[in-house]
Image (cartoon, helix red, strand yellow):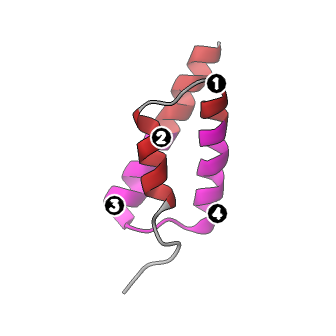
Amino acid sequence: MQEGVQCLLRAEVIRNHDKYVLDKNYCPIYAKEALKRAYHAYHELHGNDVATGLYNEVMALPTEVRE
């Protein structure tokens, strides 16, 4: 069960990365907060592979569109 939850959380980190880093180039504050909670739960389940770098890239984005 733990591995399944870890896998779902990892997929959520990847999905958010693709959406905000690759598609939008910004991440609203509410989305960062949700991702932060998902990532910390993932990390507590001993997940710490490529998702950490992806998480950090999302968190480094601005929270609003830059024009």
Q: Are marks 4 and 2 in contact (CB under 8 Å)?
A: no
In-image side of 32 versus 57 (left or right): right
Q: Is residue 52 above or below residue 57?
A: above
Q: Who's the residue at 59% across and 41% down the image?
A: 39
Mark 2 lies on a secondary structure that is: helix
Identify residue type, mark 1.
Leu
Q: Which portion, as a residue range, is magenta?
A: 13-40
Mark 2 neighbour density, 10 Å: few (under 14) some (14–19) many (20 or more): some
Type of amino acid at the residue the image marks with label 2: Thr
Front residue of 32 and 53: 53
Name the quarter where the C terminus is drawn: bottom left
The numbered disc on residue 23 is: 3
Determine whether the residue tagged by mark 4 lies in a helix, strand or loop.
Answer: helix
Question: Residue 20, position in %: x, y?
Answer: 42, 59
Question: Which dot marks residue 30?
Answer: 4
Q: How crowded is the residue under tag 3: few (<14 C-alpha within 10 Å), some, or many (20+)?
A: few
